[in-house]
Image (cartoon, helix red, strand yellow):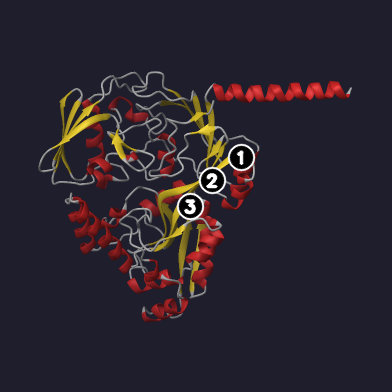
Amino acid sequence: MNNLLRTSAFASSFALLAGLGAAQAAGDVTVGLQLEPPHLDPTGAAAGAIDQVLYSNVFEGLTRFGPDGSVDPGLAESWEISEDGTEYTFHLHEGVTFHDGTDLTAEDVVFTLDRARAEESANAQKALFEGIESVEAVDSLTVKVTLSEPDGSFLFNMAWGDAVIVAPESIEDIKSNPIGTGAFKFSDWTQGDSIDLVKNPDYWGTPAALDTATFKFISDPSAAFAAVMAEDVDAFYSYPAPENLANFEADPRFRVLVGSTEGETILAMNNGAEPFNDPKVREAVAHAIDRSALIDGAMFGYGEPIGTHFAPHNPDYVDLTEQSNYDPERSKQLLEEAGYGDGFTTTLKLPPPSYARRGGEIIAAQLREVGIETEITNVEWAQWLENVFNGKDFGLTIVSHTEPMDIGIYARPDYYFQYDNPDFQQVIETLTATADPEGRSKLWQQAQQIIADDYVNGYLFQLPLMSVVKTGLEGIWADAPTQAVDLTAVHWAE
Protein backbone atom coordinates (compact mmCIF):
# COMPACT_ATOMS: atom_id res chain seq x y z
CA MET A 1 0.00 0.00 0.00
CA ASN A 2 2.86 2.39 0.93
CA ASN A 3 4.61 1.67 -2.36
CA LEU A 4 1.35 2.28 -4.20
CA LEU A 5 0.85 5.60 -2.41
CA ARG A 6 4.42 6.67 -3.15
CA THR A 7 4.03 5.72 -6.81
CA SER A 8 0.72 7.57 -7.03
CA ALA A 9 2.19 10.66 -5.34
CA PHE A 10 5.17 10.60 -7.69
CA ALA A 11 2.89 10.28 -10.70
CA SER A 12 0.74 13.16 -9.47
CA SER A 13 3.79 15.35 -8.83
CA PHE A 14 5.21 14.50 -12.25
CA ALA A 15 1.91 15.32 -13.91
CA LEU A 16 1.76 18.62 -12.04
CA LEU A 17 5.31 19.53 -13.05
CA ALA A 18 4.69 18.44 -16.61
CA GLY A 19 1.57 20.57 -16.73
CA LEU A 20 3.47 23.56 -15.39
CA GLY A 21 6.24 23.03 -17.89
CA ALA A 22 3.72 22.77 -20.71
CA ALA A 23 2.13 26.05 -19.67
CA GLN A 24 5.51 27.76 -19.59
CA ALA A 25 6.60 26.23 -22.87
CA ALA A 26 3.39 27.48 -24.45
CA GLY A 27 4.41 30.97 -23.42
CA ASP A 28 1.58 31.93 -21.10
CA VAL A 29 2.09 34.45 -18.32
CA THR A 30 -0.15 36.16 -15.76
CA VAL A 31 1.01 39.44 -14.26
CA GLY A 32 -0.57 40.91 -11.16
CA LEU A 33 -1.18 44.65 -10.96
CA GLN A 34 -2.78 46.67 -8.20
CA LEU A 35 -4.55 49.20 -10.42
CA GLU A 36 -6.99 48.64 -13.27
CA PRO A 37 -7.07 51.15 -16.14
CA PRO A 38 -10.17 53.37 -16.33
CA HIS A 39 -10.16 52.75 -20.10
CA LEU A 40 -7.69 51.65 -22.76
CA ASP A 41 -6.71 54.85 -24.58
CA PRO A 42 -3.20 55.92 -23.49
CA THR A 43 -3.65 59.18 -25.39
CA GLY A 44 -6.79 60.14 -23.50
CA ALA A 45 -6.19 60.02 -19.73
CA ALA A 46 -3.59 60.65 -17.04
CA ALA A 47 -3.89 57.17 -15.50
CA GLY A 48 -0.53 55.37 -15.49
CA ALA A 49 -2.34 52.02 -15.32
CA ILE A 50 -3.23 52.39 -19.00
CA ASP A 51 0.42 52.56 -20.01
CA GLN A 52 1.29 49.72 -17.65
CA VAL A 53 -0.79 47.33 -19.73
CA LEU A 54 -0.60 48.80 -23.24
CA TYR A 55 2.67 50.72 -23.71
CA SER A 56 4.98 48.87 -26.13
CA ASN A 57 2.85 45.74 -25.79
CA VAL A 58 -0.12 46.99 -27.85
CA PHE A 59 0.75 50.57 -28.81
CA GLU A 60 4.04 52.00 -30.07
CA GLY A 61 5.38 55.48 -30.71
CA LEU A 62 7.86 56.96 -33.14
CA THR A 63 10.46 56.48 -30.43
CA ARG A 64 10.36 54.33 -27.28
CA PHE A 65 11.98 54.04 -23.88
CA GLY A 66 14.44 51.26 -23.22
CA PRO A 67 14.81 49.52 -19.84
CA ASP A 68 17.70 51.84 -18.96
CA GLY A 69 15.70 54.97 -19.78
CA SER A 70 17.32 55.49 -23.18
CA VAL A 71 15.29 56.85 -26.07
CA ASP A 72 15.41 54.28 -28.88
CA PRO A 73 13.88 54.00 -32.35
CA GLY A 74 10.30 52.79 -32.36
CA LEU A 75 8.04 52.90 -35.39
CA ALA A 76 10.53 55.36 -36.84
CA GLU A 77 13.65 53.46 -37.87
CA SER A 78 15.60 56.70 -38.32
CA TRP A 79 15.26 60.47 -38.45
CA GLU A 80 17.08 63.64 -39.45
CA ILE A 81 17.05 66.95 -37.58
CA SER A 82 17.52 70.26 -39.39
CA GLU A 83 20.47 72.45 -38.48
CA ASP A 84 18.26 74.92 -36.65
CA GLY A 85 16.60 72.11 -34.67
CA THR A 86 13.06 72.89 -35.79
CA GLU A 87 12.45 70.15 -38.39
CA TYR A 88 12.37 66.42 -37.66
CA THR A 89 12.02 64.06 -40.59
CA PHE A 90 11.01 60.56 -39.48
CA HIS A 91 11.36 57.47 -41.65
CA LEU A 92 8.89 54.74 -40.72
CA HIS A 93 9.64 51.02 -40.84
CA GLU A 94 8.25 49.26 -43.88
CA GLY A 95 5.65 46.52 -43.54
CA VAL A 96 4.10 47.69 -40.26
CA THR A 97 0.41 46.89 -39.89
CA PHE A 98 -2.13 47.65 -37.23
CA HIS A 99 -3.83 44.73 -35.52
CA ASP A 100 -6.87 45.13 -37.78
CA GLY A 101 -4.69 44.53 -40.84
CA THR A 102 -4.47 48.11 -42.08
CA ASP A 103 -1.05 49.50 -43.01
CA LEU A 104 0.76 52.04 -40.87
CA THR A 105 1.43 55.10 -43.00
CA ALA A 106 2.68 58.63 -42.52
CA GLU A 107 -0.95 59.78 -42.51
CA ASP A 108 -1.51 57.89 -39.25
CA VAL A 109 1.32 59.85 -37.66
CA VAL A 110 -0.17 63.09 -38.94
CA PHE A 111 -3.56 62.10 -37.52
CA THR A 112 -2.08 61.14 -34.15
CA LEU A 113 -0.04 64.29 -33.60
CA ASP A 114 -2.74 66.62 -34.93
CA ARG A 115 -5.30 64.93 -32.67
CA ALA A 116 -3.01 65.24 -29.63
CA ARG A 117 -2.39 68.97 -30.14
CA ALA A 118 -5.92 69.92 -31.22
CA GLU A 119 -7.78 72.51 -29.18
CA GLU A 120 -10.34 69.91 -28.06
CA SER A 121 -7.67 67.29 -27.29
CA ALA A 122 -8.22 65.16 -24.19
CA ASN A 123 -4.55 64.17 -24.09
CA ALA A 124 -3.34 64.41 -20.49
CA GLN A 125 0.09 65.58 -21.69
CA LYS A 126 -1.10 67.98 -24.37
CA ALA A 127 1.81 70.29 -23.51
CA LEU A 128 4.18 67.76 -25.10
CA PHE A 129 2.75 68.68 -28.47
CA GLU A 130 2.24 72.44 -28.12
CA GLY A 131 5.55 73.22 -29.83
CA ILE A 132 4.48 71.47 -33.04
CA GLU A 133 3.76 73.94 -35.79
CA SER A 134 2.86 71.44 -38.50
CA VAL A 135 2.95 67.73 -39.36
CA GLU A 136 3.29 66.71 -43.01
CA ALA A 137 3.27 63.35 -44.77
CA VAL A 138 6.15 63.65 -47.25
CA ASP A 139 5.35 60.23 -48.66
CA SER A 140 3.70 57.06 -47.30
CA LEU A 141 6.59 56.28 -44.96
CA THR A 142 8.10 59.73 -44.30
CA VAL A 143 6.80 62.37 -41.90
CA LYS A 144 8.12 65.88 -41.36
CA VAL A 145 7.36 67.57 -38.05
CA THR A 146 8.06 71.29 -37.88
CA LEU A 147 8.42 72.93 -34.48
CA SER A 148 7.84 76.58 -33.71
CA GLU A 149 11.24 76.62 -31.98
CA PRO A 150 13.96 74.08 -31.16
CA ASP A 151 13.05 71.52 -28.50
CA GLY A 152 15.88 69.49 -27.01
CA SER A 153 13.35 67.07 -25.48
CA PHE A 154 11.29 66.36 -28.60
CA LEU A 155 12.52 62.80 -29.26
CA PHE A 156 12.12 62.09 -25.53
CA ASN A 157 8.56 63.44 -25.62
CA MET A 158 7.66 61.25 -28.58
CA ALA A 159 8.52 58.17 -26.48
CA TRP A 160 5.80 58.90 -23.90
CA GLY A 161 2.72 56.72 -23.82
CA ASP A 162 0.67 59.81 -24.60
CA ALA A 163 2.41 59.96 -28.02
CA VAL A 164 1.77 56.41 -29.27
CA ILE A 165 0.54 56.19 -32.86
CA VAL A 166 -3.13 55.46 -33.41
CA ALA A 167 -5.22 55.14 -36.58
CA PRO A 168 -8.35 57.10 -37.53
CA GLU A 169 -10.11 53.86 -38.55
CA SER A 170 -10.09 52.49 -35.00
CA ILE A 171 -10.14 55.64 -32.86
CA GLU A 172 -13.88 55.56 -32.13
CA ASP A 173 -13.64 52.38 -30.03
CA ILE A 174 -10.11 52.83 -28.69
CA LYS A 175 -11.20 53.04 -25.06
CA SER A 176 -12.66 49.53 -25.10
CA ASN A 177 -10.99 47.92 -28.14
CA PRO A 178 -7.43 49.26 -28.54
CA ILE A 179 -5.83 48.56 -31.91
CA GLY A 180 -2.14 49.28 -32.19
CA THR A 181 0.96 47.98 -33.95
CA GLY A 182 2.65 46.20 -31.04
CA ALA A 183 3.89 42.67 -30.46
CA PHE A 184 0.64 41.83 -28.65
CA LYS A 185 -2.99 42.26 -29.65
CA PHE A 186 -5.78 43.13 -27.27
CA SER A 187 -8.02 40.11 -26.71
CA ASP A 188 -10.45 40.65 -23.85
CA TRP A 189 -11.21 42.84 -20.84
CA THR A 190 -13.19 41.40 -17.95
CA GLN A 191 -13.74 44.61 -16.05
CA GLY A 192 -12.90 44.37 -12.39
CA ASP A 193 -10.75 41.32 -13.02
CA SER A 194 -8.31 41.10 -15.93
CA ILE A 195 -7.15 42.06 -19.41
CA ASP A 196 -5.94 39.43 -21.89
CA LEU A 197 -3.43 39.98 -24.68
CA VAL A 198 -2.39 37.53 -27.39
CA LYS A 199 0.73 37.37 -29.52
CA ASN A 200 0.58 39.36 -32.76
CA PRO A 201 1.62 36.85 -35.46
CA ASP A 202 2.15 39.64 -37.98
CA TYR A 203 4.37 41.84 -35.84
CA TRP A 204 6.85 43.86 -37.89
CA GLY A 205 9.72 43.56 -35.37
CA THR A 206 11.15 40.86 -33.13
CA PRO A 207 8.18 38.67 -32.23
CA ALA A 208 7.14 38.20 -28.62
CA ALA A 209 8.26 34.98 -26.93
CA LEU A 210 4.93 34.71 -25.09
CA ASP A 211 1.76 33.46 -26.74
CA THR A 212 -0.64 34.99 -24.24
CA ALA A 213 -0.41 37.49 -21.41
CA THR A 214 -3.00 38.20 -18.75
CA PHE A 215 -2.95 41.24 -16.48
CA LYS A 216 -4.79 40.38 -13.27
CA PHE A 217 -6.00 43.30 -11.14
CA ILE A 218 -5.72 42.78 -7.39
CA SER A 219 -6.08 45.97 -5.40
CA ASP A 220 -5.95 44.57 -1.86
CA PRO A 221 -2.38 43.94 -0.56
CA SER A 222 -3.49 40.86 1.41
CA ALA A 223 -5.11 39.38 -1.68
CA ALA A 224 -1.96 40.18 -3.65
CA PHE A 225 0.13 38.21 -1.16
CA ALA A 226 -2.26 35.25 -1.34
CA ALA A 227 -2.27 35.29 -5.15
CA VAL A 228 1.53 35.22 -5.37
CA MET A 229 1.91 32.50 -2.75
CA ALA A 230 -0.73 30.36 -4.48
CA GLU A 231 1.06 30.97 -7.81
CA ASP A 232 -2.13 32.33 -9.31
CA VAL A 233 0.09 34.99 -10.90
CA ASP A 234 3.55 34.48 -12.39
CA ALA A 235 4.70 37.96 -11.43
CA PHE A 236 3.32 40.82 -9.40
CA TYR A 237 4.62 44.07 -10.82
CA SER A 238 5.01 46.93 -8.33
CA TYR A 239 4.02 44.71 -5.45
CA PRO A 240 1.90 46.75 -2.99
CA ALA A 241 2.90 45.20 0.36
CA PRO A 242 6.63 45.68 1.06
CA GLU A 243 6.25 44.01 4.46
CA ASN A 244 5.89 40.66 2.63
CA LEU A 245 9.06 40.85 0.55
CA ALA A 246 11.17 38.93 3.08
CA ASN A 247 8.77 35.99 2.75
CA PHE A 248 9.32 35.86 -0.99
CA GLU A 249 13.07 36.34 -0.74
CA ALA A 250 13.24 33.23 1.47
CA ASP A 251 11.15 31.16 -0.94
CA PRO A 252 13.08 29.55 -3.84
CA ARG A 253 9.96 29.73 -6.01
CA PHE A 254 10.35 33.49 -6.34
CA ARG A 255 12.74 36.32 -7.10
CA VAL A 256 12.31 39.79 -5.66
CA LEU A 257 13.30 42.69 -7.93
CA VAL A 258 13.89 46.03 -6.23
CA GLY A 259 14.53 48.92 -8.58
CA SER A 260 13.80 52.58 -9.11
CA THR A 261 10.98 54.42 -10.85
CA GLU A 262 10.37 57.89 -12.21
CA GLY A 263 7.67 58.27 -9.56
CA GLU A 264 7.99 61.37 -7.40
CA THR A 265 5.54 60.72 -4.58
CA ILE A 266 4.12 64.02 -3.38
CA LEU A 267 1.60 65.49 -0.99
CA ALA A 268 0.02 67.72 -3.61
CA MET A 269 -1.46 71.01 -2.40
CA ASN A 270 -4.10 73.04 -4.19
CA ASN A 271 -2.12 76.24 -4.77
CA GLY A 272 -5.19 77.85 -6.31
CA ALA A 273 -7.37 77.66 -3.19
CA GLU A 274 -7.15 78.89 0.38
CA PRO A 275 -5.20 78.32 2.52
CA PHE A 276 -2.64 76.71 0.17
CA ASN A 277 -2.42 79.81 -2.01
CA ASP A 278 -0.25 81.16 0.84
CA PRO A 279 3.41 80.03 0.53
CA LYS A 280 3.81 80.14 4.32
CA VAL A 281 1.03 77.60 4.75
CA ARG A 282 2.61 75.34 2.15
CA GLU A 283 5.97 75.64 3.89
CA ALA A 284 4.30 74.85 7.21
CA VAL A 285 2.86 71.66 5.72
CA ALA A 286 6.26 70.68 4.35
CA HIS A 287 7.97 71.09 7.74
CA ALA A 288 5.22 69.05 9.44
CA ILE A 289 6.12 65.92 7.48
CA ASP A 290 8.57 63.40 8.90
CA ARG A 291 9.71 61.61 5.75
CA SER A 292 11.66 58.95 7.64
CA ALA A 293 8.61 57.95 9.69
CA LEU A 294 6.50 57.99 6.52
CA ILE A 295 8.89 55.76 4.57
CA ASP A 296 9.28 53.36 7.49
CA GLY A 297 5.57 53.23 8.28
CA ALA A 298 4.03 53.17 4.82
CA MET A 299 6.85 51.64 2.75
CA PHE A 300 8.68 49.50 5.37
CA GLY A 301 11.90 51.36 4.68
CA TYR A 302 11.73 51.26 0.87
CA GLY A 303 11.90 54.65 -0.84
CA GLU A 304 14.37 57.54 -1.07
CA PRO A 305 13.44 60.93 0.43
CA ILE A 306 13.13 63.81 -2.04
CA GLY A 307 12.98 67.57 -1.58
CA THR A 308 11.84 68.53 -5.06
CA HIS A 309 10.11 67.02 -8.09
CA PHE A 310 13.06 65.20 -9.67
CA ALA A 311 14.36 61.64 -9.58
CA PRO A 312 17.42 61.15 -7.33
CA HIS A 313 18.97 58.71 -9.82
CA ASN A 314 19.14 61.47 -12.43
CA PRO A 315 22.61 63.07 -12.62
CA ASP A 316 21.04 66.54 -12.52
CA TYR A 317 19.21 65.89 -9.24
CA VAL A 318 19.78 68.42 -6.46
CA ASP A 319 19.26 67.15 -2.90
CA LEU A 320 17.00 69.77 -1.32
CA THR A 321 15.51 67.62 1.44
CA GLU A 322 17.01 69.75 4.23
CA GLN A 323 15.14 72.78 2.94
CA SER A 324 11.87 71.11 3.98
CA ASN A 325 13.19 69.13 6.93
CA TYR A 326 10.92 67.86 9.69
CA ASP A 327 10.49 70.78 12.08
CA PRO A 328 7.02 70.91 13.69
CA GLU A 329 7.86 73.97 15.78
CA ARG A 330 8.84 75.88 12.63
CA SER A 331 5.59 74.64 11.09
CA LYS A 332 3.52 76.06 13.97
CA GLN A 333 5.38 79.37 13.74
CA LEU A 334 4.66 79.65 10.02
CA LEU A 335 0.98 78.91 10.56
CA GLU A 336 0.88 81.66 13.19
CA GLU A 337 2.50 84.12 10.77
CA ALA A 338 0.00 83.16 8.07
CA GLY A 339 -2.96 83.81 10.37
CA TYR A 340 -3.73 80.18 11.14
CA GLY A 341 -2.41 80.00 14.68
CA ASP A 342 -5.44 77.92 15.65
CA GLY A 343 -4.92 75.62 12.68
CA PHE A 344 -7.46 74.76 10.01
CA THR A 345 -9.28 71.82 8.45
CA THR A 346 -8.83 70.62 4.88
CA THR A 347 -9.57 67.62 2.70
CA LEU A 348 -7.13 64.79 2.02
CA LYS A 349 -8.27 62.71 -0.96
CA LEU A 350 -6.43 59.42 -1.37
CA PRO A 351 -6.37 57.29 -4.55
CA PRO A 352 -6.11 53.47 -4.29
CA PRO A 353 -2.34 52.74 -4.21
CA SER A 354 -1.15 51.53 -0.82
CA TYR A 355 1.55 54.24 -0.67
CA ALA A 356 -1.29 56.79 -0.75
CA ARG A 357 -3.73 55.08 1.59
CA ARG A 358 -1.11 54.03 4.16
CA GLY A 359 0.89 57.21 3.76
CA GLY A 360 -2.23 59.34 4.08
CA GLU A 361 -3.00 58.03 7.56
CA ILE A 362 0.55 58.76 8.71
CA ILE A 363 0.62 62.25 7.20
CA ALA A 364 -2.80 63.06 8.67
CA ALA A 365 -1.43 62.25 12.14
CA GLN A 366 1.68 64.37 11.53
CA LEU A 367 -0.37 67.34 10.33
CA ARG A 368 -2.65 67.02 13.35
CA GLU A 369 0.38 67.57 15.59
CA VAL A 370 0.77 71.10 14.21
CA GLY A 371 -2.93 71.94 14.21
CA ILE A 372 -3.98 70.91 10.69
CA GLU A 373 -6.97 68.56 10.66
CA THR A 374 -7.67 66.51 7.53
CA GLU A 375 -10.91 64.97 6.35
CA ILE A 376 -9.73 61.78 4.64
CA THR A 377 -11.67 60.47 1.67
CA ASN A 378 -10.58 57.30 -0.13
CA VAL A 379 -11.43 57.58 -3.83
CA GLU A 380 -11.11 55.25 -6.79
CA TRP A 381 -8.95 56.31 -9.72
CA ALA A 382 -11.88 57.38 -11.88
CA GLN A 383 -13.09 59.66 -9.07
CA TRP A 384 -9.59 60.99 -8.48
CA LEU A 385 -9.15 61.83 -12.16
CA GLU A 386 -12.56 63.47 -12.41
CA ASN A 387 -12.66 65.39 -9.14
CA VAL A 388 -9.03 66.01 -8.19
CA PHE A 389 -7.05 66.01 -11.43
CA ASN A 390 -9.68 67.53 -13.71
CA GLY A 391 -12.04 69.22 -11.22
CA LYS A 392 -9.30 70.55 -8.88
CA ASP A 393 -11.69 69.84 -6.00
CA PHE A 394 -9.28 69.07 -3.17
CA GLY A 395 -7.09 70.56 -0.49
CA LEU A 396 -4.46 67.83 -0.26
CA THR A 397 -3.88 64.56 -2.08
CA ILE A 398 -1.10 61.99 -2.31
CA VAL A 399 0.01 60.68 -5.67
CA SER A 400 3.15 59.44 -7.36
CA HIS A 401 3.94 61.14 -10.67
CA THR A 402 5.46 58.27 -12.62
CA GLU A 403 5.96 60.07 -15.93
CA PRO A 404 9.66 60.50 -16.78
CA MET A 405 11.33 63.91 -16.34
CA ASP A 406 8.01 65.65 -15.82
CA ILE A 407 9.01 68.72 -13.81
CA GLY A 408 7.63 70.75 -16.74
CA ILE A 409 4.12 70.21 -15.36
CA TYR A 410 4.88 73.02 -12.91
CA ALA A 411 4.93 75.43 -15.85
CA ARG A 412 1.22 74.79 -16.47
CA PRO A 413 -0.95 77.11 -14.33
CA ASP A 414 -4.06 75.05 -15.14
CA TYR A 415 -2.47 71.79 -13.93
CA TYR A 416 -4.35 70.28 -11.01
CA PHE A 417 -2.23 71.83 -8.23
CA GLN A 418 -2.51 75.24 -9.97
CA TYR A 419 1.00 76.60 -9.44
CA ASP A 420 1.59 79.81 -11.40
CA ASN A 421 5.11 81.26 -11.39
CA PRO A 422 6.25 83.18 -14.51
CA ASP A 423 9.91 82.81 -13.49
CA PHE A 424 9.59 79.04 -13.45
CA GLN A 425 7.70 79.08 -16.74
CA GLN A 426 10.56 81.08 -18.29
CA VAL A 427 13.12 78.53 -17.08
CA ILE A 428 11.18 75.70 -18.73
CA GLU A 429 10.75 77.73 -21.92
CA THR A 430 14.51 78.36 -22.03
CA LEU A 431 15.20 74.70 -21.26
CA THR A 432 13.02 73.61 -24.16
CA ALA A 433 15.01 75.77 -26.56
CA THR A 434 18.41 74.69 -25.18
CA ALA A 435 20.30 71.82 -26.77
CA ASP A 436 23.65 72.20 -24.97
CA PRO A 437 23.87 69.46 -22.26
CA GLU A 438 25.68 71.67 -19.77
CA GLY A 439 23.17 74.45 -20.24
CA ARG A 440 20.25 72.06 -19.87
CA SER A 441 21.76 70.63 -16.69
CA LYS A 442 21.94 74.07 -15.07
CA LEU A 443 18.35 74.81 -16.05
CA TRP A 444 17.10 71.48 -14.64
CA GLN A 445 18.79 72.35 -11.36
CA GLN A 446 17.39 75.87 -11.35
CA ALA A 447 13.89 74.52 -11.93
CA GLN A 448 14.23 72.14 -8.98
CA GLN A 449 15.33 74.97 -6.71
CA ILE A 450 12.45 77.28 -7.66
CA ILE A 451 9.67 74.83 -6.81
CA ALA A 452 11.46 73.85 -3.59
CA ASP A 453 11.72 77.54 -2.63
CA ASP A 454 8.00 77.99 -3.34
CA TYR A 455 7.05 74.82 -1.41
CA VAL A 456 4.61 74.03 -4.19
CA ASN A 457 3.94 70.56 -2.81
CA GLY A 458 5.13 68.35 0.00
CA TYR A 459 7.89 66.23 -1.56
CA LEU A 460 7.90 62.82 0.08
CA PHE A 461 9.93 60.05 -1.57
CA GLN A 462 10.91 58.50 -4.87
CA LEU A 463 8.63 55.52 -5.40
CA PRO A 464 10.62 52.27 -5.48
CA LEU A 465 9.70 49.44 -7.82
CA MET A 466 9.30 46.17 -5.96
CA SER A 467 8.22 43.20 -8.04
CA VAL A 468 7.88 39.52 -7.21
CA VAL A 469 8.61 37.16 -10.09
CA LYS A 470 8.49 33.40 -10.36
CA THR A 471 11.88 31.76 -10.68
CA GLY A 472 12.40 30.98 -14.34
CA LEU A 473 10.48 33.96 -15.69
CA GLU A 474 12.97 36.31 -17.35
CA GLY A 475 12.78 39.77 -18.91
CA ILE A 476 10.65 41.68 -16.38
CA TRP A 477 12.20 45.14 -15.97
CA ALA A 478 13.74 45.75 -12.54
CA ASP A 479 13.52 49.54 -13.01
CA ALA A 480 10.68 51.59 -14.42
CA PRO A 481 11.96 54.40 -16.65
CA THR A 482 8.38 54.74 -17.86
CA GLN A 483 4.93 53.55 -16.83
CA ALA A 484 5.01 50.19 -18.56
CA VAL A 485 5.08 46.47 -17.95
CA ASP A 486 6.89 45.77 -21.19
CA LEU A 487 6.38 42.08 -21.99
CA THR A 488 7.94 42.12 -25.45
CA ALA A 489 11.12 40.40 -24.25
CA VAL A 490 9.65 38.38 -21.36
CA HIS A 491 10.10 34.62 -21.60
CA TRP A 492 10.36 31.44 -19.57
CA ALA A 493 13.90 30.15 -19.13
CA GLU A 494 14.51 26.87 -20.88
Q: Residue furthest right?
A: 1
Above-or-below relation of 3 to 369: above
Secondary structure beneath label 3: loop
Front residue (pair 359, 275): 359
Q: Which residue is mark 3?
A: 351
Secondary structure beneath label 1: helix
Q: Split into 4 quadrants, where in the image is the C terminus? A: top right
**Label 1 CA crowd tier, 10 Å (few <14, some 14–19, many 20+):** many
| Mark-to-mark CA distance, 1 and 3 | 23 Å
Q: Is residue 378 visible?
A: no
Above-or-below relation of 124 to 280: above
Q: Which residue is mark 2?
A: 239
The reply to whether callout 1 and callout 2 are in contact (CB within 8 Å) is yes
- Residue 287 x/y as whole percent: 43, 72
| Mark-to-mark CA distance, 1 and 2 | 10 Å
Q: Image quadrant of residue 174?
A: top left
Callout 2 amino acid:
Tyr
Q: Residue at x 36, y 47 (%)?
A: 403
Q: Which residue is mark 1?
A: 228
Count the marks.
3
**Label 2 CA crowd tier, 10 Å (few <14, some 14–19, many 20+):** many
Q: Is residue 247 left or right of residue 362?
A: right
- Residue 231 x/y as whole percent: 62, 35
Secondary structure beneath label 2: loop
Give the mark nearer the N terminus: 1 vs 3. Answer: 1
